[in-house]
Image (cartoon, rainbow, N blue to C red):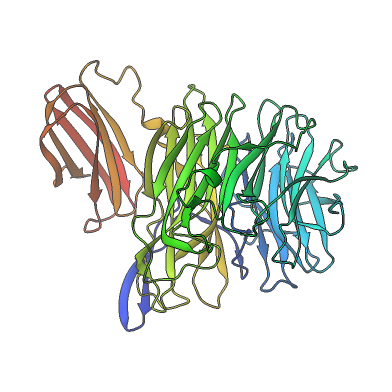
Amino acid sequence: MKNAIGSFGLVLIIAGAVPAQYCEPPGEIAGTTQYLVQSSGVSANRIAFDEQEGVHITWMSGSSIFDRNVRYNFRDESGQWLATDGMPVNEVNGAGYPTLALNADNAAAVTYHNVNDNYVGLAVDAFRGMAVFEYFDPPDNIPGGGNGFWPQIAISTNGDIHILMVQHTQDQGIYPKMIYSRSTNGGETWTSTEVVADVALLNGCITASSDGKVGIVYLEPVISGEFSQVKNDICYFVSPDGRDWDFRTPENITDYANDNEELFCPWGIDAVFDSDGNLNVVWVTGHIGDDGSFIDEVCQLWHFSEQTGYVSQIAESSDPLLTCTYGAVTLPISMPGIAYTNDAYGNEALSVIYIGYDESDASSEGECVGDLYATFGFEDGQVWDGPYNITQSHSPNCAPGDCLSENFPSLAENMNEWAHPTYVMQKLGDIPDTIYYMPVEVPIGDAVDDDERIPGSFSLLGNYPNPFNARTTIRFELAEKSDVRLTVYDITGARVAVLHDGILDAGIHKVSWNAEEEASGVYYYKLATDAGISTRKMVFLK
């Protein structure tokens, strides 16, 4: 991957009567839309990263529920996009909420539903990145009556196409049914739909492993017979081959119904398999009272590893959001996506990317302005690094139409040394929003090579993010207590900052640098300890 993070630029924005300069968001533009809500409260798989380092993205365009349509764009390994604003997948009005997966030829298979004609469709590209689609008609009938909408797709290693759907119902007092169907011949024929579970919301995901497994993760109401869309447990099914399913007894990860802590998952889940076929799941929780209302708006982000059986909290919103609003299907932490990598050197890592809100960053009309955050997991999710604000596109007191609010992210399940998210840049006004692609460096490469490490002394582990916009965090490890001086220099060799000067105990340390007063460019940071000196390079982009 040659083009890591796109250039940052400065733009003058007038927010009310307050002039300010805000950084444009990082990344590359894949398309535009006037339809902000790209998924039903989950990140969904709207992006895929293929074996040749190509990027496939799908999204919903149009301005209303009845004239919307589905689009697709492809970025090849040289960084060239197929089209400026993508290509149509389905030009029939009413198509929307697409997700995609890649087949064995690295061609995109895009599924979507159409609200005008009440059906779920599937479009499969004839070749990798060509946007020459052949159309198929998977079954969407609910046993007992009704139709499935909001499809999620996965393709297993044997070529089977798996689609998960949720019943479209207007009755708010009845839990919709989640259904599943499969094609073993590229979409020509399908199995009859099966009911997976009664679910609280439209949240669910399906994922396939490299060893043939297929997993389904969903929200299960915690109390049978009591209708609540926000009191849910996280449950899953795994089929060893994607064909043998038993939907009678799910695995319950959380068992919130019996913990008496008023902690539940209202929405927001995602899952991925690691290279050994172990499921990893992320979700968001809030504290919810008996009446279904939030006791406070502090929420948490969690990870479950099937390998270890551990549940770990990996992020938490810092404060309740009392002064700004953030939408009907979002929380201060929202829409997490998870990805996995096992690189050529045997390094394994998980990446989790989500939307975070900060009450200090709100529009002039009181709407919260979102940023993308990332956190990275190692050792089967037992060790986490982060979270980091990876967009930092703050626009406090911005006027609607001028705001820079990241929203509705989606993360490719596979990654190399980069994680591959897409997101919607929302201006909070009546203008088209922008679909961005932004590769994010994973600090898996920050592990120092054995020949660079000084045994029993110290290691300079690198900084993240790099490149960065204003703020970055430098990590280093001390084998024993030492006098430490951490200094930053510009490209001329002039010292611009001393970040630490004093004694530190043994262990891993993190020191942040705020470079907002400095010029864009290349900087060097030098770590001097009792055992020696190490220097690394970082890039500041405004």
Instruction: Please give the count of numbered marks on the rendered protein.
Output: 0
Q: Where does the image place residue 146, in percent across and percent down from the top left? A: 84, 59
Q: Residue at x 44, y 74 (%)?
A: 402
Q: Residue furthest bottom?
A: 17
Q: Where does the image place residue 239, in percent across and percent down from the top left? A: 72, 31
Q: Establish if 139 lies above or below 248.
A: below
The C terminus: image quadrant = bottom left
Q: Viewed as shown, does residue 333 lie left or right of 186?
A: left
Q: Where does the image place residue 134, in percent across and percent down from the top left? A: 84, 50
- Quadrant in the picture for residue 253: top right
Q: Viewed as shown, does residue 30 lie left or right of 195?
A: left
In the rendered image, is residue 179 in sight? Answer: yes
Q: Which residue is drawn at 40% across and 46% down?
A: 315
- Quadrant in the picture for residue 413: top right
Q: Establish if 528 lies above or below 300.
A: above
Q: Where does the image place residue 384, in percent across and percent down from the top left? A: 39, 36
Q: Which residue is drawn at 85% across and 66% down?
A: 117
Q: Residue at x 63, y 59 (%)?
A: 40
Comparing 445 with 225, the one in front is 225
